[in-house]
Image (cartoon, rainbow, N blue to C red):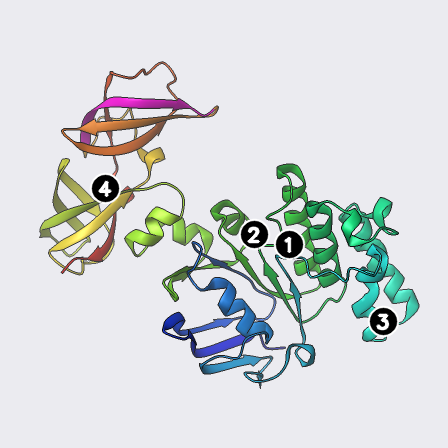
Amino acid sequence: MDGITAGNLKMVFGDFVAVRDVSFEVAAGEFVTLLGPSGCGKTTLLKMISGFLTPTGGTIHLSGVDVTRTPPEKRDTALCFQSYALFPHLSVLENLEFGLRQKRVPPAERRQRLDAVIDNLDLALHLGKLPNQLSGGQQQRVALGRALVMRPNVILFDEPLSNLDAKLRDQVRIEIRRIQRDFGLTAIYVTHDQAEALAMSDRVFVMNGGKIEQADTPEELYSAPKTSFVADFIGSANVLEADVTSTNGNGDVELSTPLGPLKANSGAPPMGRKVKICWRPEHADLTATGENRLSARVTHRAFQGHFTDLHLDDGGNGYRIQTNQPSIREGDTVTFSLRSDQIVLLEALA
């Protein structure tokens, strides 16, 4: 079974370009998340894959078949809507089994699928209720269950956990991933929650302005972002401009920055003489005496349990570090070091 292939997808609404020439492949059985801020095009892209929007340009293939203009009901997909889209006149049980009855799934298998979803989503006490008798979180769980019982080749999620409380969100997140793996489903998941995307995905497509800025594994996105947008959107990052003053064939780069001279090892030559760079707050080492020593005054501290978040100021240049030394207070001056391989070179500047 093949996965999903999209070629040069474009979606235009009047003068607004929502999706700009997007191409990608999702392997069979892969879990991919579309991640980005509101208005970046991720939900529009999902609706094109599901068939609820016809692209202005480009093609979509599911399992090797061109479905660019195939209606949703004729695609082997199931979509879990953010807005629930439950049948208001049907009970929870009737909503859950509606698609199974339409597909003429045998009663024994239908019961087995329903029992598994009802148990895992904690819906047993609500089966006889109508949607308007449920809370928003309960309705979201029914919508999720209705998609999961279908076990399609491709399952699509439009921020399905947004209305759940934190504990249930973690439980359902794990259950979604388990079902997806157990049944070999190809999944595309839309969210603006970075932690959710990193925890669930085989790969994450970070979207910005209708384009995919970077498509990579969660680990690679976090440790080796390719643009300042990705670096700043995935977790916390200190992003600043720098001038490249020297390089060598081993990937070593010397930089002139507003914080002073820094050394980086990017593993590859920089793309220009003026670049953006970043480093993660947790990489600051207050005990080391190695390269890239920096000192700054603490302007704000926030105790976060397993670490303390420190906002620093170095002559008008602000940045953040994280430390497990809770004794540091506002007004203190801290000195720390950064390893050269923890300073990441991003895009070149004109």
Determine crowd level at label 3: few under 14, some 14-19, many 20+ residues with C-alpha closer than 10 A: few
Identify which amino acid the numbered label 1 is placed on.
Arg
Q: Which residue is mark 1?
A: 177
Magenta stretch, residue numbers: 293-304
Q: Relative to residue 315, is residue 320 drawn left or right?
A: right
The answer to whether marks 1 and 2 mark residues whose Cβ atoms lie closer than 8 Å is yes
Q: Which residue is mark 4?
A: 340
Examine the residues drawn in magenta and state their main secondary structure.
Answer: strand
Q: Which residue is mark 3?
A: 101
Report, in whole angstroms, how far the alpha carbon at label 2 lies from the one at label 4: 30 Å
Q: Nearer the viewer, mark 1 or mark 4?
A: 1
Secondary structure at numbered mark 4: helix
Report, in whole angstroms, how far the alpha carbon at label 1 lies from the one at label 4: 36 Å
- Establish if 65 lies above or below 303: below
Residue 173: x and y in percent read: 63, 48
Q: Which one is earlier in the sequence, the residue at label 3 or at label 2?
A: 3
Identify which amino acid the numbered label 3 is placed on.
Arg
Q: Relative to residue 335, is residue 245 drawn left or right?
A: left
Q: Which residue is mark 2?
A: 200
- Establish if 18 lies above or below 219: below
Determine crowd level at label 1: few under 14, some 14-19, many 20+ residues with C-alpha closer than 10 A: some
Residue 302 appears in which quarter of the rendering?
top left
Q: Tell whether position 67 is magenta.
A: no
Residue 127: x and y in percent read: 86, 51
The answer, for residue 224, to whether it is visible in the render is no
Q: Which one is earlier in the sequence, the residue at label 1 or at label 4?
A: 1
Report, in whole angstroms, how far the alpha carbon at label 3 lies from the one at label 4: 60 Å
Identify which amino acid the numbered label 4 is placed on.
Ser
Secondary structure at numbered mark 2: helix
Q: Which one is earlier in the sequence, the residue at label 3 or at label 1?
A: 3
For the C terminus, which image quadrant? bottom left
